[in-house]
Amino acid sequence: MELYLKIRYILRNVCRVDSIYEMQTTCLLLTMDVILLGGLAMAVYVENGVVCIKHNPNKSPYPIEVERCDTYAKIVQWIAHLSEKTWCTREIIYDFIEVACGHHGLNYHKDGAA
């Protein structure tokens, strides 16, 4: 049940998914991603004021305090830092951007940063 609530929170607050149909579709796409990644879910989520990057199911998430990624400039600095990690992928970078921007109400599509 706890995992369901986390997924529901992420879908509603980060992905801005409101309807049950959208949730089911998004969950199906996430499931397909997990299968394509060989069963390893690359999860980026916010918990207790920290952006957590779960890059390995056997390790603790990589933590980034939300106040350290609350502007576009800070997010770019984190992207540069994360890209040096051996475990970091394009998908993780993309998910980090979406989660950090979503958490802080930053819309890089609308703001012209896309």
Image (cartoon, rainbow, N blue to C red):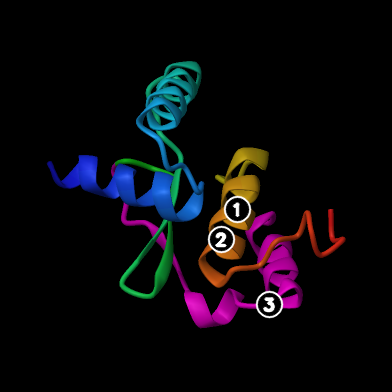
In this view, which residue lies farthest toward the right?
112
**Image point (40%, 34%), residue name:** 41
Distance from disc 1 to disc 2, alpha carbons, whole Å, reads 6 Å
Q: Which residue does the numbered mark 3 point to in the structure image?
A: 71
Mark 2 closeness class: few <14, some 14–19, many ≥20 residues within 10 Å: some
Question: Distance of mark 3 from mark 2, alpha carbons?
Answer: 11 Å
Of the 4 image quadrants, the one containing the N terminus is top left
Q: Position of residue 95 (x, y in %)?
A: 57, 47
Specify start and end residues of the magenta stretch as a single range. Answer: 58-84
Tell me, yes or no, whether the two marked residues, 3 and 2, touch with CB atoms within 8 Å: no
Residue 79 belongs to magenta span: yes
Local crowd size for mark 3, using a 10 Å CA cut-off: few (<14), some (14–19), many (≥20):
some
- Tell me where residue 49 appears, x and y as whole percent: 38, 75
Residue at the disc numbered 1: 98
Please identify the quarter of the rendering in which residue 80 is found. Answer: bottom right
* Residue 63, picture quadrant: bottom left
In percent of width and height, residue 61 lies at 37, 57
Q: Mark 3 belongs to which amino acid?
A: Thr
User: Do the residues under discs 1 and 2 have CB atoms within 8 angstroms?
Assistant: yes
Q: Is residue 54 above or below residue 36?
A: below
Type of amino acid at the residue the image marks with label 1: Glu
Mark found first going from the N terminus, 3 or 2: 3
Judging by the rendered image, the residue that carries numbered circle 2 is 102
Relative horizontal placement of residue 2, taking residue 10 as reference (left or right):
left
Say which element carries label 2. helix
